[in-house]
Amino acid sequence: MSGVAAQQDIATTCPYCGVGCGVLVDRDADGDYRVRGDKSHPANYGRLCSKGTALAETIGLDGRLLHPEVDGVRVSWDSALDRVSEGFARVINEHGPEAVAFYVSGQLLTEDYYVANKLMKGFIGSANIDTNSRLCMSSAVAAHKRAFGSDTVPMEYTDLEQADLVVLVGSNLAWCHPVLNQRLLAVKKQRPSMQLVVIDPRVTPTCDGADLHLALKSGTDTYLFNGLLAWLHGQGQGDHEFLSQHTTGVEATLEVALAHASSVKLVAERCGLDEEQVQRFYHLFSRTEKVVTLFSQGINQSARGTDKGNVIINCHLYSGRIGRSGMGPFSITGQPNAMGGREVGGLANQLAAHMDIDNPDHRRWVSEFWQTDNLAPAAGLKAVELFDAVASGRVRALWIMGTNPAVSLPDGNHVRRALSRCELLVVSDCVDSNDTLNFAQVKLPAQTWGEKSGTVTNSERRISRQRAFLDAPGEAKPDWWALCQVARRLGYGGFDFEQPADIFDEHARLSAYRNDGERDFDLSGLVDLEPRDYADMQPVQWPFTTRGTVDRLFANGRFFTPDRRARLVPVEPHPPALLPDEDYPLILNTGRVRDHWHTMTRTGRSPRLSGHVKEPCISLHPDDAGRLGLVHGALGRVQSRHGEALLRVDVSSSQRPGEAFIPMHWNDEYAASAAVGRLVNPAVDPVSGQPEFKYTPVRISTYQAAWYGFLLSHRPMHIPHANYWCKVRRQNHWQYELAGDSLPADWARFARGLLCEEDSQSQWFELHDSTQANYRAARIMDGRLDAVLIVQPGLDLPPRDWLSQLFGKVALQSAERRCLLSGLPPKGQQDAGAVVCSCFGVGVNTLRQAIRENQLTSPESIGELLNAGTNCGSCIPELRRLITDEAHEAVAG
Ligand code: SF4
């Protein structure tokens, strides 16, 4: 691949999570790209997590969509854009602007987002543009607006470092925002008096550094924080001067809190916690001045997520812990540019530049600024409603950009039906196949990370440049360009942008338009940047006015409500939308694993990242597993009222009894039946429209297959007879985990057909029994291992990691050839085991052996010996667990 800049460091930002780490990209002597943390970027100061560290592995062109396609046929951009504009124009003419929609993404750059929103809301005249950020943090947005009158995150990452107590609620920070977790733990190491409380139903790696973990029952956060408010009130902790001068709603809010959570005993009962634990948390909060409460998807992804955000904010407002350094409520965003999407109005119920779609003044100002008389008159359809409208035919033309809703939305089977019925489905993406793209009539090749140029805003309101360092391959184009081309074809003015800098300038101007400090989002200080200034722009936090950055938000006690007072919001507790019952007795929670991102479009290409958690699992407590007869490592069929999945069973005491967890990443490209969205109920928060991903009743039963096996192969392939399969990218090959209901008539013939027997250069090793139940084969091509297939009736298959290592060898030794069909290394070689440290590729067996033989007692000592844990640090909680496990085994003898 040829690059636009060969030698110099290019400063850009990581495309994954909302921490928004700065990275530097350059090329080594062989011309290969290298990615390292940018020491000057204030989000990470040089740190990266495992995902950021492996970015260079993900920039190849395998599986890229390189040319526009219409109805499966390659066409020119002109033809494709004509089809999009004619299709949208026809639907608008025949059915009105509400019959078309855009569904966009927190992966878009702000400039793309701005143009999409301007086109839909400003000129098509519908607010039917929503974003996958609806699934991530729209409840926090709604809670901010109710409390502050604006979607303002008043916090900075340094507040976490300055706090004396950090409360993490519904956040597995160690895996989901690892660099922030590293920053936090670094401070805690220097200042052990800093207290860390984790509130999460699961024991996660984040608990590793915690002083207190409250493993509350899923969905009971409202009781806990209403209880905290009642406790603060009882302790005389109200900041009465602040409350009387800067807030409203105190009395009503206290009344509700006292009615529902008047005592620690009651709260503990409701939340399934010990009284002592609850009391300890309340004591910590009330006696610590500098408290940051960081909340994330565990709060937001709920049918009452907005309420849960407000019940947290209430405690900070009541005690005056806001507007000063080291304290406040901190909603952390999942995606790299969720915050940028909020700035431009990417959600269907926003306008642009933090203006409100239901405010007549704001609508008039935006109309004036955009010079349009067709501004959307009211809020549009939020994500779940939008796909319901596609299913019912109310929305007939849909353009999806940079997101995979067939996987990521709840009730995935319904979403797939909607996509299959859509009259005109346009998808812009960088890949040539995914669960959503496969339904599209029009496929538009989008530029991706490394190729596109623009800005993103992270969770602390810091705008950073994403810069291109690669030439765009094939005919890939920026999303803003495709949108402008369609807008012009539809006859709209105001879409003659020539470069991202032009769009950013208009975005900054709009933020300043008729803004005399009444609106929080203000980039007036970034208006009229010269192209060179935009190109060189350093990370900057908003508001950034003509006077530069403003003081800390809310430091003056003035909020963005009409009366400038913050609102405490009374929050009645409500149960989740669907409760477990006899048919569906377990509660399903969903979330991330450490090394994958969203639907694996990028991370699924990285052998390092794919090696950490190779298969999608359902984790459940040993008591539940025992009751249901489920065995660790077996396969389980998981069913909800909405769909089902087939997953590996992970029996783990990190789950609460009665609760289970499935990761969100796997999809039909990587597994036979593991897209958890198919199971998740589509209940949404009544205010924010955010779905309840954290609470779906399910049932689980053992899936008894006729055979189990695995295939390691140089080439990706489709495997018939496998009812269960899961595909994993490994170094130089693919790994397939397999199981099936029916046996092929002849395994040997099946294997040779699958693995291309006709090639005369190949050498076969085979082992099978007469019953056809056991079969093992290995194929060697030109001295290199090409494939290994092992099948048998039971689950106790040989390990895969030693065999995987052999795919990197130019020639196998004779001892290795002899051992191939056993899967066990010859004497003197070791199976490194599953990857624990992705950065240095250190496996679990290597770690266990090193801990045992060298009596290692700390992650630091492991790091000195094996490097593990010394780069991004994401694996440190697992290193600690291994040390503990080995110590227990040593004691047990
Ligand atoms: S924490 Fe990791 S995934 Fe998130 S922005 Fe930083 S390097 Fe990327």
Image (tube, grey):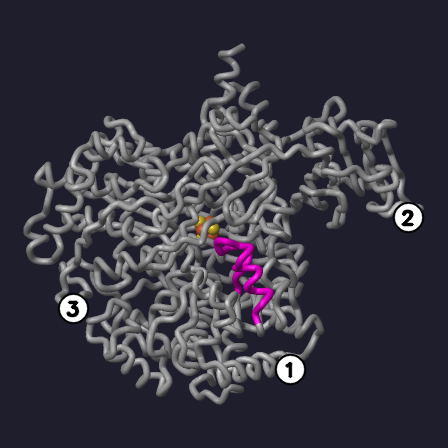
Please give the count of numbered marks on the rendered protein: 3
**Which residue: 6% across, 52% down?**
241
| Residue depth check, mark 2 versus mark 3: number of the one nearer the observer | 3
Q: Which residue is denoted by mark 3 in the rendering? A: 562
Residue 482: x %, y % from top left: 54, 77
* Prevailing secondary structure class for the magenta stretch in the rendered image: helix
Residue 105: x %, y % from top left: 47, 63
Q: Which residue is denoted by mark 2 in the rendering? A: 759
| Residue depth check, mark 2 versus mark 1: number of the one nearer the observer | 1
Crowd class of label 1 (few under 14; some 14 to 19; many from 20; radius 10 Å): few
**Which residue: 75% across, 46% down?**
719
Examine the structure image and report whether residue 290 is included in the region drawn in magenta: no
Side of 892 relative to 525 (left or right): right
Alpha-carbon span between mark 2 and mark 3: 76 Å
Q: Which residues are magenta?
A: 402-422
Marks 2 and 1, the one that precedes in the sequence: 1
Alpha-carbon span between mark 2 and mark 1: 42 Å
Which disc number belongs to residue 79?
1
Q: Is residue 54 above or below residue 879?
A: below
Examine the image and state in which quarter residue 582 appears.
top left
Residue 34: x %, y % from top left: 57, 54
Q: Are marks 2 and 3 in contact (CB under 8 Å)?
A: no
Crowd class of label 3 (few under 14; some 14 to 19; many from 20; radius 10 Å): few
Q: Classify mark 1: helix, strand or loop.
A: helix
Residue 339: x %, y % from top left: 37, 61
| Residue type (three-letter) at the residue carrying disc 3 | Pro
Q: Classify mark 2: helix, strand or loop.
A: loop
